[in-house]
Image (spheres, rainbow, N blue to C red):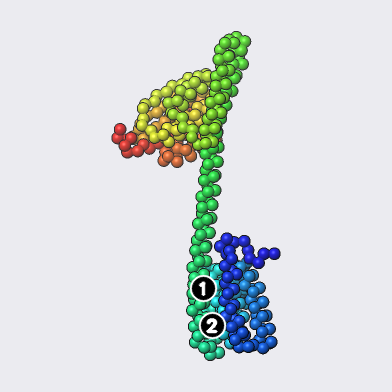
Amino acid sequence: MRVLPKNHFLGWTPYAWLVYLFFFYLQPIYGHAGIREWVITMAATLVFVVLYFRGYWLSGWSLVLNTAGITLIGVLLTPHNPGAVAFFIYASAFIAFSGDTSFALKLLGTLLAILSVEAWFLHFSLGTWLTGAVFVLIVGGVNIHFAQARRDARKLEMAQEEVEHLAKVAERERIARDLHDVLGHTLSVIVLKSELASKLMERDPERAKNEIRDVEKISRDALADVRQAIRGYRAKGLSEEMARARATLETAGVRFDCEAKEIGLSPAQESVLALVMREAVTNVVRHAKARTCKVELQRVNGDCMLQIEDDGRGGFQIEGHGIRGMRERIEALGGHVERSTGQGTRIKITLPLNVEESRA
């Protein structure tokens, strides 16, 4: 059974503070106390020690009541033994941890008032009252300060834990988005090329072999992309992604029209737009049943505008994980996503360029 709770703030100090009991034993020792006085002294010490160590396990009103018990020992014994004023000092130390700073200060004032009223009515010596009052104020005040510092430290720890938790959640979401972008697109291409190779196997074996080789190459590239996505280093260029989009759409039998102008994008913007291109093209291949997909990249009013439009069936108003991930990426860079599904599907992304780029 533990005497003290596990707390790195405490250490061995609770045992050291028992040194104040020395003052309680001065009177019996130097006054050659009789049996009765020694019995009272030892009984009071035993009760105090139980309350003292119990106090380290309590908080709130339970600690207040426990502290009141220590104060009562001081009230009852100080008139007969001036050294019993030490119990007021112990009480002041526990008061600091009974509540917030305001509540603790009120209790400290109450404790000091009890000591002063008793000293007035029972005519304590000035030395007894002054010693008790000064130490009650010093010990109580210092402990109130450290109790508040400990609460602030705990709040900071909780805030740091929350930040770490949110960072982990954000990282998991990033990995989930990246894996969705990588695998969603790549698996769609693999399926298309595999179906094409299966159809060509009898009538054009050589082309079927080429498609299978493409499947192998795409699979290897996908594995590398997954590894890079997990590490957080994947950042394909926009021009490379457009070339990949052309190959993917043409494999699916969709004509690809591209009108792209050179725009000075930051690496982060280019990486995000490349991922957006990949997600949009994947959706065209999977869901649109389109014949044509048109991509425009240009500068409009100082902003970068990327528009991806197909002539497919449209009509899907509910956004899936891919579209939501796309929107989150763009909005994180201060951009905006517009999506319409009336006739086909049109996705318009606007990203603000910095001042220097706008003047270029």
Is residue 239 visible in the rendered image? The answer is yes
* Relative vertical location of residue 111 with respect to residue 126 in this rendering, above or below: above
Per the image, label 1 sits on a secondary structure element best described as helix
SS class, disc 2: helix
Amino acid at dot 2: Leu
Q: Which residue is mark 2?
A: 115
Across and down, in percent, residue 179 comes to 55, 34
Quadrant for residue 94, please give it.
Answer: bottom right
**Extreme-left residue of the structure:** 359
Query: Measured along the vertical axis of the image, is residue 333 above or below residue 285?
Result: below
Of 162 and 309, nearer the camera is: 162
The residue tagged 1 is 140
- Separation of disc 1 and disc 2 at Cα? 14 Å
Q: Position of residue 327 (x, y in %)?
A: 48, 37
Instruction: Categorize mark 1 by other alpha carbons within 10 Å: few (<14), some (14-19), many (20+).
Output: many
Q: Residue, x 52% and y 62% (percent of image)?
A: 151
* Front in this rendered view, residue 142 or 268: 142
Furthest toward the top, the residue is 203
